[in-house]
Image: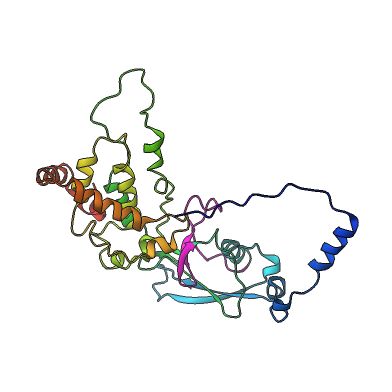
């Protein structure tokens, strides 16, 4: 996406004591448009309610929403901080995934107030109603906020997300080099952290999770197809050229709207479809048959061998 032009900062210059007093006076003067608006500190002074999805498979009971009340003055600013506080001080049975706390690992992906995101990157926005937290939608739940991502990871494995070469590197050779222009083609794809926010927000994936690869996996598939160092481009294109694997994408754009890293899986899928259309030959049928014969389980992420 286009980035706004950077603003040049004016050089610093010393201020007189009178100027500093004037600035301070204006800072404490209430603005006209903000007279009736509550500040964050005022809202945060009151407790905040959280409504959290609970499910324990050992109890064999139906899932339910449990409400907790947290004093925001004694809690960090992020949704993950609230979850950790609840687990540490209120209810130790609450279960969720988390690791890096910096939006890198993707472990704490969940549905917060109806939108998928990372709990460690989303601020607590105080409100009268309870903040609703649920596991990633349309996924099997292991416990509470922990979804079963086995199918997702198997589908990711099925695209063979590693560099594939037809020649062998000579002894003593180091890297496979590529130009700066070819390297730039991978921007916006290699940053994917596989959090599954986009996958579980896609209606097409809800309907056909066992066949449609989904936005994150297709993004990663195109990442290797676009890599100039990879020598299996045609085989990769032939394998993904399928009514269910690729063409279940209808451009709904939920994936791009909810990506916590600001990536555009929908755009990558468009490029992937264009690459298939531009490169297709009848020889792909033989290549596809050969790919399936090599690993029949690869056809479905649920049965990957």
In the foreground, 103 or 182: 182
In the foreground, 180 or 37: 180
Q: Which secondary structure class fits the magenta region best?
A: loop
**Quadrant of the snapshot with the N terminus:** bottom left
Q: In this view, does 33 lie above or below 168?
A: below
Residue 5 is situated, as x and y percent measured from the top left of the image, at 55, 52
Q: Is residue 140 left or right of residue 11?
A: left
Q: Is residue 39 above or below residue 237?
A: below
In the foreground, 59 or 103: 103
Q: In which quarter of the image is residue 43?
A: bottom right
Q: Does the magenta stretch include residue 111?
A: yes
Question: Going 22% across and 46% down the picture, which residue do you hit?
Answer: 237
Q: In which quarter of the image is residue 200?
A: bottom left
In the foreground, 305 or 37: 37
Q: In this view, does 66 lie to the left or right of 220?
A: right
Q: Does the magenta stretch include residue 154?
A: no
Question: Going 24% across and 56% down the picture, which residue do you hit?
Answer: 246
Q: In this view, does 21 lie above or below 103?
A: below
Question: Going 46% across and 56% down the picture, which residue do you hit?
Answer: 262
Q: Can residue 167 be seen in this view?
A: yes
Q: In which quarter of the image is residue 225?
A: top left
Residue 297 is situated, as x and y percent measured from the top left of the image, at 20, 49
Q: Give the range drawn in magenta.
A: 90-117
Q: Is residue 19 above or below residue 37?
A: above
Residue 171 is situated, as x and y percent measured from the top left of the image, at 33, 18
Type of colouring: rainbow
Residue 148 is situated, as x and y percent measured from the top left of the image, at 37, 60
């Amino acid at each position: 996406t286009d980035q706004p032009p950077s603003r040049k900062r004016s050089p610093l210059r010393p201020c007189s004591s009178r100027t500093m007093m004037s600035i301070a006076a204006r800072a404490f003067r209430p603005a006209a448009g903000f007279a009736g608006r509550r500040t964050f500190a005022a809202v945060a002074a009151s407790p905040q309610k959280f409504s959290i999805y609970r499910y324990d498979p050992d109890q064999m009971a139906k899932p339910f929403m449990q409400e907790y009340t947290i004093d925001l003055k004694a809690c960090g600013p992020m949704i993950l901080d609230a979850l950790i506080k609840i687990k540490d001080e209120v209810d130790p049975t609450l279960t969720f995934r988390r690791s890096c706390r910096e939006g890198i690992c993707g472990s704490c992906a969940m549905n917060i107030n109806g939108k998928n995101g990372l709990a460690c990157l989303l601020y607590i926005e105080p409100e009268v109603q309870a903040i609703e937290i649920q596991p990633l939608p349309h996924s099997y739940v292991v416990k509470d906020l922990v979804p079963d991502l086995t199918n997702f990871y198997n589908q990711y494995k099925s695209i063979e997300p590693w560099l594939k070469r037809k020649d062998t590197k000579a002894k003593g050779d180091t890297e496979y080099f590529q130009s700066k222009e070819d390297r730039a083609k991978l921007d916006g794809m290699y940053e994917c952290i596989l959090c599954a926010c986009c996958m579980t927000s896609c209606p097409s994936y809800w309907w056909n999770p066992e066949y449609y690869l989904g936005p994150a996996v297709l993004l990663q598939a195109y990442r290797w197809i676009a890599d100039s160092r990879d020598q299996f481009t045609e085989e990769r294109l032939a394998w993904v050229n399928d009514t269910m694997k690729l063409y279940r994408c209808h451009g709904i754009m939920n994936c791009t709207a909810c990506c916590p890293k600001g990536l555009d899986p929908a755009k990558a899928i468009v490029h992937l479809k264009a690459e298939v259309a531009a490169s297709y030959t009848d020889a792909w049928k033989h290549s596809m048959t050969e790919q399936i014969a090599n690993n029949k389980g690869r056809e479905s992420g649920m049965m990957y061998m």
